[in-house]
Amino acid sequence: MASRFLERLGIAQPLVLAPMSGASTPALVAAVSNGGGLGSHGVGYLEPQAILDEAAKIRALTDRPFALNLFVLPDGVHEDEAAIDHARAALDALMEHEGLAVRTTRPERWAPRFSDQFAALCEARPPVASFTFNLLTPRQIEELQRRDIIVIGSATSLAEVRAWAALGVDAISLQGAEAGGHRGTFLHAPEEAVIGLFALIRLAARAVNVPLIAGGGIMDGRGMLAAEMLGAAVSQLGTAFLGCPESAAAAAWKHDLPGTDDTRVTTIRSFSGRAARGRRNTYVDAMEAQAGHFPAYPVMNALTSPLRKAAAAAGRGDLVSEWCGQAASLSRAMPATDLVAILLEEYAQARANLA
């Protein structure tokens, strides 16, 4: 199944770049695709025209297959005014305490409408499209596959794996507990679906006959082979690429990655209103206890935007949402093309050693 899936994707190597919204760039996507893997671009924060523009930039840099990723969200946003007021007061107080001149604002719109983004993705017609935060409808999947777009759904539990498989998707991306960034959980409370990647691979491989993409804590070629031995068709790496110059991660964020203590990677709600994995830093220590009183995603994500931008500009990584996976200290700061080559060399050597 693995070799057939690679052939269908049109890639030569079992490597997928995780679609890191806010950190992936067309240059990073193209580097992975040109190296024989599948570059993925997270466009969940972008307006429809920006999605079209980003797809065009990727195509200008590579003629190889690539993926676009969206967050599946309702078009309407619930506005809890009391929670919004509480969050704004807490954020403004923190920014004043930390010496940042900016304050929160109430944006005209909390986030782009998913239905508009989906229409733009269909128009962009990437070879592959992946989705997280919820299921697509059967009609949406049919619409994508009618355009010859390979459809990938994200799952954090066996129930979610089965739900995507029942819809007839082409592959399922497994997000293990070790994975950085927003949790894609949609059938459970996030704390109920923190299943280790290796256990999740084995459970999913036994339950469904769908190609599996393994993501969470994989940082080198040996990790890629380990995931494959357990039943994954390909491995998905995100944190491994955050330190690359092509990544859009803030400079302070990149600087902090190699020094990440394994016990300081945690599940965080206070940055965006949705559970996500990253570094416990000054912001998290100050705000996480209040997270239950903050509005849900995407409202909280919009409210923290001024803080995150100002902190990044000031070199304050300790006030930025430093998303990362469990093995962040294994990150390597180098051009993405070089990193792809090293990963694939490590993978080939691990296979040879096993043989």
Image (spheres, rainbow, N blue to C red):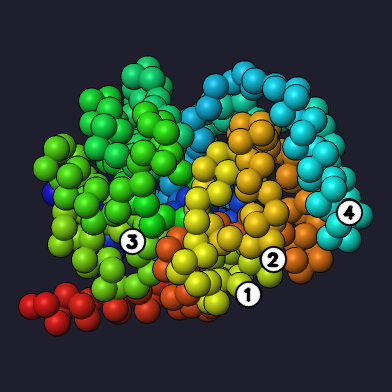
**The disc labelled 3 sits on which kind of residue?**
Leu
Name the residue rendered at 35%, 41% in the picture: 193
Query: Which residue is labeled 2 in the image?
Result: 317
Marks 2 and 3, the one that precedes in the sequence: 3
Q: Is residue 336 visible?
A: no
Marks 1 and 4 close (CB-CB < 8 Å): no
State whether residue 108 is above or below residue 22.
above
Give the residue at mark 3. Answer: 15
Q: Which residue lies at the image location 30% right of the left edge and 53% below the top edge?
A: 196
Query: Which mark, by number, is residue 255?
Result: 1
Q: Which mark is residue 93?
A: none
- Left or right: residue 90 compared with residue 68: right
Estimate the x, y position of residue 246 in percent, counting from the top left: 59, 67
Q: Quadrant of residue 274?
A: top right
Disc number lying in front (1 or 4): 4
Q: Secondary structure at mark 3?
A: strand
Q: Identify which residue, 173 or 61, lies in the foreground.
A: 173
Which residue, given by chain and number where applicable, does mark 4 sit on?
Answer: 96
Q: Amino acid at mark 4?
A: Glu
Please report whichever mark, 3 or 1, sits nearer to the chain's N-terminal start.
3
**In terms of depth relative to the viewer, which is nearer, 83 or 341?**
83
Amino acid at pointer 2:
Gly
